[in-house]
Every structure is written in C-alpha cells, then in structure tokens.
Image (cartoon, rainbow, N blue to C red):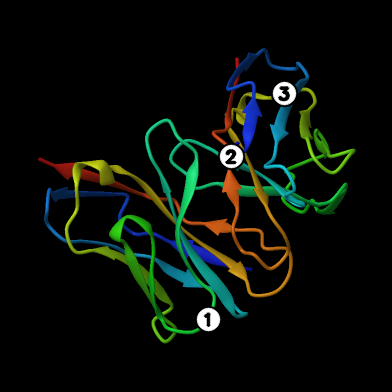
C-alpha cells in the first residue's frame, strides 16, 4: 500500500518568507509526528497529533512554527518569517495506533532558506 | 529526559565481515529502544525494536540487537554484511508510557567495502 508522502520534496525560500510543508500519512493511521533533521544530526521531535489535536507540541522551537491536522489525516507544518537556521529536512511519520510503537516515515522535505 | 549516544559516526566494514554498531542511552524512566535505517535517498525504516521479553531481538535483513539494562546499551549486530547494507543507522528511545515520541542518536554511517 501507499506509504507516508510529503510535499514538496524540496523547498527553497528566502529569509523572512512563509512556507507550508505537507504530510499525507498512511490511511487509517491515527497518530502523526513531525521531526526535523539537521545536517549530521538525528531527527528531533517537533510535534505529535493524535487525531485532529496537537497532543504534544513541546518540540516546536518557537512561535514561528505551527502545525495543523484539521480532519485527522493530512497535516501541514507552517513556518513564518523563515530564518537560515530553519534549513533542514523535515520528516513526517505516522503510526497506526497508540501502543503500536511503530512509526512509518515519509521521505522528508528538504527546506533551504537563503 | 532521554538521550542517545552513538559514538561511532562512521564504520567501514569489508563485505561478508561482521559488524557491531554501538548505542548507549540515558533515561530516568524505563524506555523502549529502536534501530532505524536510512538508505540513500529513502525515508527512515524500522529495523527492530525492544519493548519487553527476550533481550535479544531480531529484525529485518539479518540484523539483531541486544538490550543490556545494566550497561544501558542496545548494540546492533550483523554476522555478515552485504553491499546493500550501506546506509545510515539511527538508534532511538521512547518512554515506555506516553505519546511514543522518539529521541534519536546522531547516527552511524555504515560503509561496506567490496
């Protein structure tokens, strides 16, 4: 079946611009996670959704970052006033249910802020 | 909070030789442990996980890992590697309760030498 998809695969934007990154989870998966992977580092947790609500947003670095999942499926990560330090690969993962401890990752969106 | 240390950033191994990738973790609460693999230009894929039971867990592609609570380690092993094992390997932990968000190590790049 179809895996987790993320669009766009690459995004180049200028400092100060607004960007949206999209994640389509595996159909039926209730849990959705966003991570950020900087060069040479492991992924770092940003936010977790269970259904439509953000159950844990403790990893968002500041209030320029925001994410939504209005219908409990597709999620959008929004970054305002982008900075060069936001350049990274943004990963999305979905999980079939609480307690499965299996996250399926998408290929990521590479964001470059110039 | 949890943390994961992967001391070896790069490991070169001859084809058909055995390999061990080291992972140590730190946590004030009980954790579950994971190994993920990232092949070139692909998303993260779960190799194996330890939740409970036998401390020796077997995963896909002939990999296995052993949980050692006293040494807070979860090293990954394979008795004979192949060219196709060339990838980046990430160790990760999560609390054994809560929302299952993962804390990753910085990764180990495994390079197979023909």
Residue A21 percent location from the top left of the image: 71, 27
**Callout in the foreground (1, 2):** 2
Give the answer, above or below, for where B65 lies relative to A25. below
- Write down the residue under mark 2: A1
Asked whether, in this view, residue A53 is left or right of residue B27, the answer is right
- Write down the residue under mark 1: B52
Give the answer, above or below, for where A82 lies relative to B79. above
The residues tagged by marks 3 and 1 sit, at their Cα atoms, a distance apart of 42 Å
Contact, mark 2 vs mark 3 (Cβ under 8 Å): no
Instruction: Report the disc number at residue A82.
Output: 3
The residues tagged by marks 2 and 3 sit, at their Cα atoms, a distance apart of 35 Å
Q: Quadrant of residue A67?
A: top right
| Category of crowding for the residue at label 3, using alpha-carbon neighbours closer than 10 angstroms: few (below 14), some (14–19), many (at least 20) | many
Q: Nearer the viewer, residue A43 or B38?
A: B38
Same subunit: marks 1 and 2: no
| Category of crowding for the residue at label 1, using alpha-carbon neighbours closer than 10 angstroms: few (below 14), some (14–19), many (at least 20) | few
């Amino acid at each position: 079946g179809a895996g987790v998809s993320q669009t766009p695969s690459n995004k180049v934007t200028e400092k100060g611009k607004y960007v949206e990154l999209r994640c389509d989870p595996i159909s039926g998966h209730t849990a959705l996670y966003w991570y950020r992977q900087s060069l040479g580092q492991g992924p770092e947790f940003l936010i977790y959704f269970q259904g439509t609500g953000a159950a844990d947003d403790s990893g968002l670095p500041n209030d320029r970052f925001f994410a939504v999942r209005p219908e409990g499926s597709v999620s959008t990560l929004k970054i305002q006033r982008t900075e060069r330090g936001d350049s990274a690969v943004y990963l999305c993962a979905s999980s079939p249910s609480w307690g499965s401890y299996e996250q399926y990752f998408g290929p990521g969106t590479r964001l470059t802020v110039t | 909070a949890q943390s994961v240390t992967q001391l070896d950033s790069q490991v070169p191994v001859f084809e058909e030789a055995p390999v061990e990738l080291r992972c140590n973790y730190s946590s004030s609460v009980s954790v579950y442990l994971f190994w993920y693999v990232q092949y070139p230009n692909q998303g993260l894929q779960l190799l194996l996980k330890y939740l409970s039971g036998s401390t020796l867990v077997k995963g896909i592609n002939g990999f296995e890992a052993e949980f050692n609570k006293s040494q807070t380690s979860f090293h990954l092993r394979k008795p004979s590697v192949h060219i196709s094992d060339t990838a980046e390997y990430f160790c990760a932990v999560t609390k054994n309760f809560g929302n299952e968000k993962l804390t990753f190590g910085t990764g180990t790049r495994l390079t197979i030498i023909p």
